[in-house]
Image (tube, helix red, strand yellow):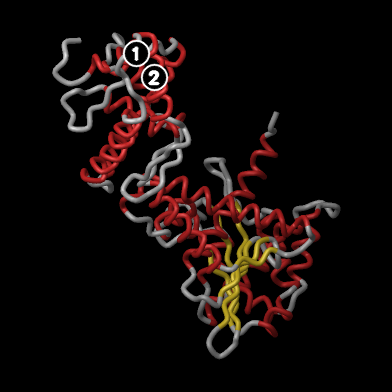
Amino acid sequence: MVTKDASSKILGFLYQMQRALYRIFSCETNNTVIGIETADDVVEEIRSENENWQVFFEQDKHSIQNNHQPYQDSSYNLWHTLHIWLFFIEEAREKYEKITYCLVSNKTIKKDNLAYILSQAKSDQEIDAALARLKEKGKAIYNGLKDSSEIKKTIGEVLKYQDENLKFLIKNITLLSEDGTKSTQDPKSATINLLHIPSELIQESENIYKSVFAHMINECICAWKQKQSVQLIPQTYKNLLYSELIARKKNRFCEQSFYKTAYQEYLKKDIDKKHLFIDQLCSINKSEEHINTALKNYWAFYSEKVRLESIGDIPLDAWQEREDILYQRWKNEWTKYDLSNVTEDEKISQYEKIYDSTTDISYLPDLNNNPTKQPYFTQGHYHFLANDNTNEFYIYWHDKFKKNEEF
């Protein structure tokens, strides 16, 4: 059983990862590195053309409680974050030309909260006022706590820092509430928009995001297992996205695996199961099990044909070309057998051999110059041709089913 505390931690971790992926696809320069659990929850480092570095230190706080304020004045989250930033502030000022300290939350932070007030202070006068508010709030909270409490110790450490460092920190704090995206959407939705997925793949947006997101999580896990820091290169993920889109575009021209097709929906509606191709299979003594499989393959092919045609990427002549190829293969098989002067039983045996060799599962002709991989797609296509004796490429497995014959 997952406890409430555990679920909150898991959601918080996933939120942090979503924020990192958002930064990866929202960054505007190739000279960017995204760190996760390095100097902060998420760290974005940007190298400028003059070789100077800019950094965004990001603290991410996620909450599923309706009225929860992750950065409320008396919260350990707020004071611990300030303490961490102050502890490394001199080191950071030596390394980076520009520093931004980001307080991120999926909640709206109230305007009278200390975190909000600190983030709004930009002028010297505003910074002085915010510093006074910080000290006033800190002392009031400090005096009301037990000496043994962890937050009291943390507030005490924050208030010990010199005004110069406190003012620098206040000046460079920014509050990114309501998920901290430009669109105010949650990081996942905002990132999906940043992927610029082509319209023909828009229905696969969720799965494309999941694929890229999973890659990032896996990269983090691999690094942490080796006790290495996570340093993500945005271009790597842009390349991954490109490969994902190309692969999915190619899939639009290919058949799905058998169990991903909508064959079951068609099979349920096919109450009578009266089909010409089934009569043909019965005429050459195919077993009931084989016929049931053939019916499934027929509907699997048919459902994929409907799906691929609805997408509109495969022209009509591509289907006709494939049907011509199947027809010619079938016709060639017939020429291998002499059906004159043989008994009816011998005929049936030869008809069955023609059927088996024609529909061999290893034969997988292309569709629109794209390879096919699923045997059902070819076998079902043959059943499709054998099911319509008005089709130009109609085929039969017993000569009594030739065109213009009485059945």
**Amino acid on which disc 1 is placed:** Val
Residue 295 appears in the picture as rendered: no
Residue 87 found in image quarter: bottom right
**Amino acid on which disc 2 is placed:** Gln
Residue picked out by circle 2 = 350
Residue 397 found in image quarter: top left
Mark 2 crowdedness (10 Å alpha carbons): few <14, some 14-19, many ≥20:
many
Q: Nearer the viewer, residue 378 or 218?
A: 378
Residue picked out by circle 1 = 342
Q: Nearer the viewer, residue 165 or 292?
A: 292
Q: Find out whether the residues at labels 2 and 1 contact each other: C-beta distance under 8 Å.
A: yes
The residue depicted at 62 percent of the width and 63 percent of the height is 42
Q: Is residue 312 above or below residue 294?
A: below
Which disc number belongs to residue 75?
Answer: none
The residue depicted at 45 percent of the width and 36 percent of the height is 374
Q: Is residue 22 above or below residue 160?
A: above
Q: Position of residue 249 (x, y in %)?
A: 38, 52
Q: Earlier in the sequence, mark 2 or mark 1?
A: 1
The residue depicted at 70 percent of the width and 28 percent of the height is 1
Q: Residue furthest right?
A: 148
